[in-house]
Amino acid sequence: MHGCFAGKLMLAVAGLAVAISAEAGRVKSPGEGEPDMVPSGKGWGEIAPPGQAHKPSKSGGGTNGILYHGGPLMLGTPTVYYIWYGGWDGNTAATILTNLAQHIGSSPYFNINTTYVDGSNRPVTGAISYGGSTSMGYTHGTALSDSNIQQIVADAIASQLPKDSNAVYFVLTSADVTATSGFCTQYCGWHANGNIAGSDIKYAFVGNPDRCPNACEQQIIGPNGNAGADGMASIIAHELEESVTDPDLNAWYDRRGMENADKCAWTFGSTYATPNGALANMKLGPRDYLIQRNWVNASGGFCAKSYP
């Protein structure tokens, strides 16, 4: 969102959701006698299906405001792949977002995720590698269902990209493409996993905020001169940190079903002005970005731009 956040509440679980009024449609924290919520993948918590246990693991602690539920994490050095969907000719997004993927790994910002461990006390390393990209054109039209998005990932793996279960495949759509399950109205991006070619593949959808700047762009001028791509950078970071700490939606989240990045969504901390007048809060490689903070799973839990 660009403009003031006063009176707004961000509703986000596995996806980065748009802002809505704090008085309408608010997801309340579970209270006495109410069930815990689990991530839905679309920007809101939901009650666990009948018979499906979602109690926190005994090793999950809870003193830091987020709980471990026993699922796997993405360890080692996960790979990021981009799938450019739609029409991107002449757009500087590829330069801006490729630089992000190449430099976010092991940065002070992404090292926040090293505060998350699995059931064997193995931490996320904070390392990320960029594996490359492919372009898909408009193979499924301009209005994508969730199943279309998974199929785009499957098509890219079948034809262009390696199959890697320790990777996150980002479907990045141009501004003339929408996702029919709620892009611009309920979320700006989301992450998921699915069985693709016999493997548990992690993937994410990130739409171009130029389609709905009032919902998915923090500012109308980006630090790299491309408001849509600069807005996508923060959404990509959000979905990537949730993917490594909760890849199958059964690892780290709180009682409202909010994952680590959700707990800090649309908060940026201290900023500085870039030469074109935009605001930024960190430099990754040679470029400036305005990227939301992430939840530190230590010292009681808090939002930060870097760790330690």
Image (cartoon, helix red, strand yellow):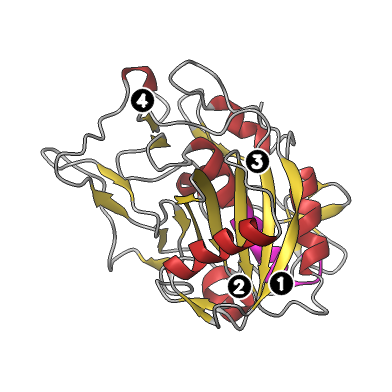
Q: Give the image location of residue 306, x and y in percent.
A: 67, 35
Magenta residue span: 223-236
Q: Nearer the viewer, mark 3 or mark 2?
A: 2
- The disc labelled 2 sits on which kind of residue? Pro
Please report whichever mark, 3 or 2, sits nearer to the chain's N-terminal start: 2
- Residue contact at pointers 4 and 3, CB within 8 angstroms: no
Q: Residue at x 26, y 52 (%)?
A: 46
Cα distance between the residues tagged 4 and 2: 35 Å
- The disc labelled 3 sits on which kind of residue? Lys
Q: Give the image location of residue 2, x and y in percent.
A: 59, 70
Residue 37 occupies which quadrant of the picture? top left
Q: Which residue, given by chain and number where applicable, does mark 4 sit on?
A: 62
Asked whether 233 falls inside the magenta stretch, the response is yes
Please report whichever mark, 4 or 3, sits nearer to the chain's N-terminal start: 4
In this rendering, would 121 be left or right of 53?
right
- The disc labelled 4 sits on which kind of residue? Gly
Q: Main secondary structure of the magenta part?
A: helix
Please report whichever mark, 2 or 1, sits nearer to the chain's N-terminal start: 2
- What element does badge 2 sit on? helix
Please report whichever mark, 4 or 1, sits nearer to the chain's N-terminal start: 4
Check the image and report above or below for 126 versus 146. Answer: above
Q: Give the image location of residue 266, x and y in percent.
A: 54, 56
In this rendering, would 181 be left or right of 163?
left
Cα distance between the residues tagged 4 and 1: 38 Å
- What element does badge 3 sit on? loop
Q: Which residue, given by chain and number where applicable, does mark 1 sit on?
A: 227
- Residue contact at pointers 2 and 1, CB within 8 angstroms: yes
Q: Which residue, given by chain and number where applicable, does mark 3 sit on?
A: 305
Q: Nearer the viewer, mark 1 or mark 3?
A: 1
Residue 209 numbered mark, or none: 2
